[in-house]
Amino acid sequence: MTQVEEAFREGHVEADGFRIRYLTGGDGPALVHLHGAGGLRLTPGHDLLSRQFRVIAFEMPGFGHSPENSRTRNTPELAATMGEAVEKLGIGSFNLMGTSFGGKTALWLALQQTERVLALVLEAPAAIRPEGAEPPSGSPEEMARRLYAHPERLSPISPPDPAVQAKTRALVARLRGPNRDADLERQLPGLATPTLVLFGTVDRVISPDMGHIYKELMPNCHLVFVYDAGHAISTDRPEAFTEVVADFLERHEAFVISRTETVIHP
Amino acid sequence: MKVSFFETAHYHSPRRLPAEWPVPPKAYNHEAGAQSYRGMVERVQYVEELGFDWVSVAEHHYSPHRLTPAPIVSAAHLAAYSQKIKVAVLGPIVSQSNPVQVAENLAMLDNLMPDRLVVGLLRGTTGEYLSYGLNPTEARERTTEGMELILKAWTEPQPFGWQGRHFHFRTVSVWPRPLQQPHPPTYALGASRESCEFAARHHLGLGIAYGPFEVMGKATRYYRDACAQYGWQPASEQIIYRANILLTKTDEEARGLLEAQRAPRDSFPLRAGVREALLQLDSRNIAGEARAPSVGGMLPTNFFGKPDTVVEQIKRCGDEVGAGVIDLMFQVPGSCDLSFLMGSLELFGKKVLPRIREM
């Protein structure tokens, strides 16, 4: 168990006929996190965010060691399930963060539950993907090169369980939808939720050139590039990631006003 | 081969200057300064008439040798006083600049001189770190990040924030956009591994300077290999080689002048303690091979002699370095006599330029 995981505790919630696992830590306003296609894995970003927020990181049905999910047909259905899971935890309104595949799920959830989602953070979202984009695959080393800016700087990640991996791949292939989802994109201009879209400048899974499309489609969207981060921004540059996410969740669009003091001596 | 004239706003002090850095501003002579800037205009018009392809300007601070702290101001002025010669800003010292402001200024410049702007971005020489209080150990990282931000500021179609290591902006949304699309021809300047790799990754040109042909050839090979890894091949014009030139009527004359130049002339050394401390903090490499940083000191003269000799040297440079543009710093030996410079330019324009065009 890593240091990060020690600060979080595990729970389960029944929702939409699934028994859904989650990890939670910290106090403060609720921040719900939906993971990427690789499943739930805590990052240093979760740890840093838990100092200001009550972080609830879900494992979506069918991911990790949860039973195979052959019922959910598409991302909107997955989003509805997750919305119910949040409700079952007794959380009314909340901040919502989605990573990659989870970014698309989060967008659908925000569309379905506009009143409850206070603000939306999309970390390297996979809701709008370049033509021909495929989910990354390959050996653990190849995956690491795709996901991280500097895999050599990270401690080795234990290889995934092949059975879990096969099950997850099939689920993601079924749920991920087209690279450009016309149904989703048609609805985005009506989504006024304050939204922060983050891309690493060296994302090798989804080009950071996708970022501006969210901004063009969504009326209250901010785009931030995290320098020298890959697809897994919160692992590559956790402090930079957390600073901007926390600031945005606190101040929404006023986060563009700097509060950094530059007085050297009073 | 294309030819660029490196314009440095030669300053000729009417009296001997204190041999120290920084040179006290009180030693500045206003009339000599005004003459330096009038000279810039005379020279750009002359080299344009002679058929030079580019004029280049650089950024140097607190320097009586080169009165060019603001290269973008130099470039705008030179462009306004010339017709078609390309103006190469080689370049803003990114490590100590606000990258967004650099992107804005250059975008504006690109519009003010349609199809004439060329851009080089660089870290700056070791001594420059003192001018604006830059931490030498951060210079490389700030340069790489700043260059990346400049390119983003030019090309991103929507406002964005920048969550960098050294630069933080919540809102970047540059107007005007560059006229040349996606941005003006841009070079990473420096023979370091970092510079070559940045240039290769972003499809930029590479500018190298002053080193011997075989050493600079190592850097350009490293760059070409890196470009190939990124799936593209640079055009010959995407490699600039900056060099000193001493062009004379005979080889003997050039040798004599070079010999005389070895004697110390105006130089402005740092105090030894500062110099040593600075050199310890800076690190430099050529294509990944460490080299000692340096502060001050004479730079080699890579092209020297009569026109025939220089034509041969330039040919060798093209072969060994692979440069498609040579950026020439015309030497004014000893006397500070600018008529020597004008004579060299004329000789170059008439006897060298026509013979290197087809290289």
Image: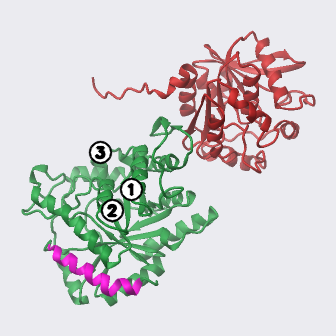
Chain colours: A red, B green
Q: What residue type is disc 3 on?
A: Tyr
Give the image location of residue B292, x and y in percent. Answer: 36, 61
Pointer 1 with pointer 2, Cβ within 8 A: yes
Residue B117 vs residue A209: left or right?
A: left
* Residue found 10% across the figure and 59% down from its top: B31
Tell me the distance, in whole angstroms, between the alpha carbons under discs 2 and 3.
28 Å
Chain containing the residue with disc 2? B
The answer to whether residue A84 is magenta is no
Give the image location of residue B135, x and y in percent. Answer: 35, 44
Q: Which label was assigned to residue B291?
A: none
Q: Picture quarter containing residue A53?
A: top right
Q: Are marks 3 and 1 on the same chain?
A: yes
Q: Is residue A54 above or below residue A146?
A: above
Q: Return the disc, 2 or 3, that comes first in the chain's sequence.
A: 2
Q: What residue type is disc 2 on?
A: Ala
**What range is drawn magenta here?**
B337-356
Chain containing the residue with disc 3? B
Q: Are marks 1 and 2 on the same chain?
A: yes
Closer to the camera in the image, A238 or B351: B351
Q: Picture quarter containing residue A220?
A: top right
Number of residues whose C-alpha sits closer than 10 Å to that of mark 3, classed few (under 14), some (14–19) or many (20 or more): few
Secondary structure under tag 2 reads helix
Give the image location of residue A91, x and y in percent. Answer: 72, 11
Secondary structure under tag 3 reads loop
Per the image, the residue denoted by label 2 is: B79
Per the image, the residue denoted by label 1 is: B112
